Amino acid sequence: MTKAMRVHATGGAEALSWEEIDVAAPGAGEVVVRNEAIGLNFIDVYFRNGLYKAPLPFVPGNEGAGVIEAVGPDVAGFAVGDRVGYVGPPGAYAERLVRPAAQLIALPDALDSVTAAQILLKGITAEYLIRRTYPVQAGDTILVHAAAGGVGQIACQWAADIGARVIGTVGSAAKRAIAERCGCARVIVTDEEDFVAAVREETGGEGVAVVYDGVGADTFEGSLACARTRGLVVAFGAASGPIPPLDLQRLNALGSLYVTRPSLAAYTRTPEELRTAAEAVFAAVARGAVRIAPPATYPLAEAARAHADLEARRTTGSIVLLP
C-alpha cells in the first residue's frame, strides 16, 4: 500500500486527507515512480478548491521527481532505477504513482530531486512565458507580478539575463530584496504604492511591452493599464481569484491591447515540446542565468498546512513536499 493525499470534496486546505491508496501495476507505456520530492504549485490549490475540475476523489499535485520502480510493456528509453521528473495532470501527492513514460523527463545527474521538483513546473512555465508566449528581447521593459514567487523568481532572472528591464511587484516590503536579487531593476511594493502609477512613471507614460500576471482578480485591471499601445497582457494564473469577464471593446480603448490566457498543457502538447522546454530550464540553471534558492519543505502528510501557508502568502519562492 501507498500513502497519499486525496480530495473527496473540494474546499479549503482541510479537504486534503492523508490515507492509503492502491497503486496499480504499470500498463503498456507506463511506469511506477517512487517520489522523492513533490512540487507544490498554485494550480494544486485551484484543483483542491474546485476552480479547476477533476473527478472526485482525486490525488492532487502536478509535479514531482523520483526513481522508476517498475516498468510496463512497450516502454522505451526508461528503465528501473532511472531518475525522472514529471509535470502534468493531478496525482503527484503520493509516495508512489503510475505515470505514462511519454510524460517523463530524464533528470541530469547534477540535479537533485528536491531541486527538480521545485523547478520543473515553475521553470517550464517561465520558459514558455518569456520565450514563446511573448519572446522577450533585449531592451524590452516588462512587468512581472508576484516577482518573489516561484514562477516570478525564475521568469525575472531569465528575462534579465536576456537583457530586458524587469519591473516586478511584490506584496510586502519583506519580499523586495528577493525580487531585487532576481534581477528586477525596479520593485514595486503593492501595499505601499499604486503599481499602475509607478509603472507609468518608470516608463515615461508609455507602459510596458508585456505584463505577466499570475495574480488575477486583484491585479488584472491594473495590468491592462500598464501595457503600452499594442502591448500584451499574459494572464497565466489567478492566485487572488478568477478574472471577471472582459469586454473586448475595452482593449481597443486601451490601445489595441492583446490578452492571452496560456496553459502549460497547450505549450507541452507533445513529449518533444515537454522535454525541449525542460532542457532549456536545465541549461539556464546550469549556466547560472537562473539561480534556485532552497525551497520551503513540508512533510507530504502536512500538505494541508503547506496549502494554508501558500494561500495566506506566508511563503516566498518554492514549496516542496517530502514523502
Image (cartoon, rainbow, N blue to C red):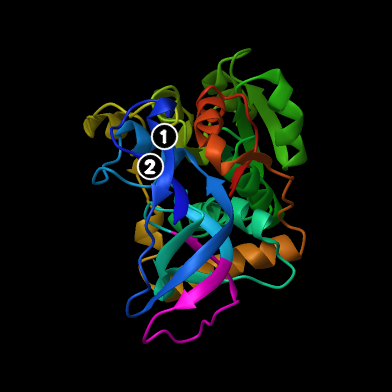
User: Residue 81 shows which numbered tag?
Assistant: none
Q: Is residue 185 above or below residue 22?
A: above
Q: Are marks 2 and 1 in contact (CB under 8 Å)?
A: yes
When asked about the image quadrant of residue 102, the answer is bottom left
Percent x, y of residue 226? 48, 30
* Residue carrying label 1: 16
Q: Residues within 10 Å of mark 1 (few under 14, many from 20)?
A: many
From the viewer's side, name the closer residue of 191 and 26.
26
User: Residue 6 shows which numbered tag?
Assistant: 2
In reply to whether residue 153 is colored magenta, the answer given is: no
Residue drawn at the location 42% of the way across and 26% of the way down: 14
Secondary structure at badge 2 equals strand
From the viewer's side, name the closer residue of 32 and 266.
32
Residue drawn at the location 54% of the way across and 72% of the way down: 68
Percent x, y of residue 159? 63, 51
Which residues are the magenta region?
A: 67-87
Give the residue type at disc 2. Answer: Arg
Visible in this render: residue 83? yes
Compare marks 2 and 1 and give the one earlier in the sequence.
2
Which image quadrant: the N terminus? Answer: bottom left
Determine the CA span between mark 2 and mark 1: 6 Å
